[in-house]
Amino acid sequence: MQPWFRNRNHRVKNNLQQVTNLLSLQSSRLTDEEAKKAVTEALLRIEAMALVHQRLYDGDRLVEINLSSFIPELIEGILRSYNYSHLQPEYRLDPIWLHVDSAIPMGLLINELVTNSCKYAFPFSPEPVIKVTCQLKKNQILLELTDNGPSFDLSQKTKTFGLKLLQIFSAQLKAESGFENKGTMFRLLFSK
Amino acid sequence: MNSSLRILIVEDEPLTALTIEEKLTEAGYEICGKAADCESAIRFLIKESPDLALIDIYLGKGQLNGIVTARELMRIKPIPIIYLTGHTEPETFSRAKKTNPLAFLHKPFRPAELADQIELALHNFYHGEKAEMVGMSDHLYVLEGQNKLLRVNHEGILMLKAEGAYTEFFLTHAEFSRLYPEKIYRSTQPLLMSVGFGHLFSNLPENFYKISRSLAINLNYLDRVEYSRVFVGECEVTLPEGGHKALIDRLNIIRSRKKK
C-alpha cells in the first residue's frame, strides 16, 4: 500500500474519532433528556460512518468493504446502544464488496432503519424480530430490512428527520426504495 | 466489574485521552495516569503501579511508538496491555501481537462501548482458559491476588505441586527474595497460586520433570537421587513406586542429549 494513502486513512480515522469524542463528551454533560437523545442519535450516525472507515484499507481491497461483515457489526452496535443486545437478527447476506462511496450512505440508511426499529417497533412488540437480507442480483444490490413492530401510517411520519434522511441516502445511491407491508419492511434496490 | 482496577492511559491526543478517562471512570475504573509518550508512561508505571495499560500505537511524530512503549513498560514491571489504535494494518497487528496484549481494539472506537470491551478482555484474561497465566520464553506470569500478575522465572522454580485447582510454587531463595524482598524465605513454605498444575506444566521447558501426577521438579536443582526419595534444592521429595526407574531413564535421556 502507498504510504501517502495509509497516512490519509489514518488521518480520516483520527478525525472521525475526534468528532465521536466531542459528541460523546457533550452528551455526558447534558441533563435534558431530549437533548441527550438528539446528541446520541447524531453520535450513532457518526459511528456508522466511522465503522466504514474502520473496515477499509486494511486488506488488499483498498476502497471496498465486505457487506456481509459490515452489516451485522453495524446493526449489533446500534442494538447495543439501545439495550437490545440480546436480540439476534436473522441475516441472509451475500458476500458483497461495496465501494466506500456507496457504503457510507448505505450504512447511514441502515442506521436510520435500525434506530427506527429500536424506537418505534421493539418497545411495542412482546418478541421483537429483525430480519436483514442483502443480495446481489445482476450487479444490483437488494437490501430488505423487516421488523415486527406495529404498522404505521406513512403519511403521518414523512416529516420526521429519520425518514427525511432515508430519502436523502436513497437519492445519493440512486436507489429505488420504500416501505412495504404497512411500514414493517423497507426495501432498497440500487446498482453496485 | 472490579471497581478498584487502576488503568494507565497512553495516548497522545488529549481529547481522546479525556474521552477514555470519562467513559472508564463512569464505568467504575480508576485512571491512575494519562501519559502522552513513552517517557511519562514509564514514570506513571513506577509511581502508580497500574493494573492495566491502555496504549495507543502512534504516539506522534518523532516519538517512540506504543508497541515499543509496551515493551519498555513490561521490561520494568509485568503489566497487562490493551492496544487501542487506528493503525490496524496486518504488519502493525503482528508486531503488536508479539507483546501478548489482552486485546487489540480499533479506532475509531465507540466511547459507550469501550468499558465493555475492556471488561471483556480482562474477563477473558483472568477467567478464561489461559487466564491464569501467560507463558514466556524463560519466565511466566501468574495471577497474584485479584488482578495482579507476578513474574516467575523458570530458573527460580525448584518444584511445583498440584493443590486442587491451584499450584504450590517452591522457589529458590534468590527468586523468592527477588519477588518478596521483605519476607523471610522458608524452603518448605511454598507460594499458592491460582493456576492449574496441568496447564502450568505444559508451558514449562523440558528440564521440568513430572515425578507424579501432582508433582514436578526442576531437574537443574536435583542434587541427590536415592531409591525412594530425591532432594531438590533444600526440599526432600518421596518417589512413588516405579518413580526411581522412570527418573533415571529420563536423566539418561538428558545426559545422552547433552553429549551430542
Image (tube, rainbow, N blue to C red):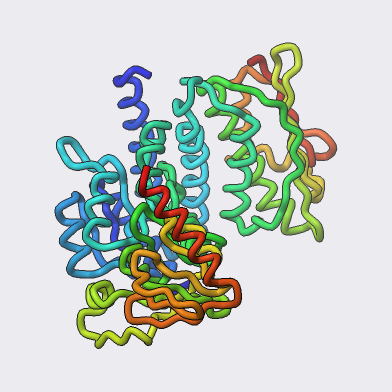
Relative image position of residue B186 (x, y in whole percent) = 31, 87
Q: Residue B169 versus residue A181: which sits nearer the camera?
A: B169
Residue A66 falls in which quadrant of the image? top right
Q: Is residue B188 above or below residue A10?
A: below
Q: Residue A84 versus residue B125: which sits nearer the camera?
A: B125
Query: Is B205 left or right of A168, judged from the image as shown?
Result: left
Residue A170 falls in which quadrant of the image? top right
Residue A85 falls in which quadrant of the image? bottom right
Q: In which quarter of the image is the C terminus of chain B?
A: top left
User: What residue lies at 24% left-to-right and 59% top-to-bottom?
Assistant: B34
Q: In this view, does B57 lie above or below A1?
A: below
User: What residue lies at 46% left-to-right and 20% top-to-bottom?
Assistant: A62
Relative image position of residue A27 (x, y in whole percent) = 42, 56
Question: Can residue A168 be seen?
Answer: no
User: What residue lies at 42% left-to-right and 32% top-to-bottom?
Assistant: B90
Question: Can residue B242 be seen?
Answer: yes
Q: Is residue A48 above or below residue A171?
A: below
Query: Is B28 left or right of B129, judged from the image as shown?
Result: left
Total numbered circles: 0
Relative image position of residue A139 (x, y in whole percent) = 69, 13
Q: Is residue B93 above or below residue A140?
A: below
User: What residue lies at 77% left-to-right and 45% top-to-bottom?
Assistant: A147
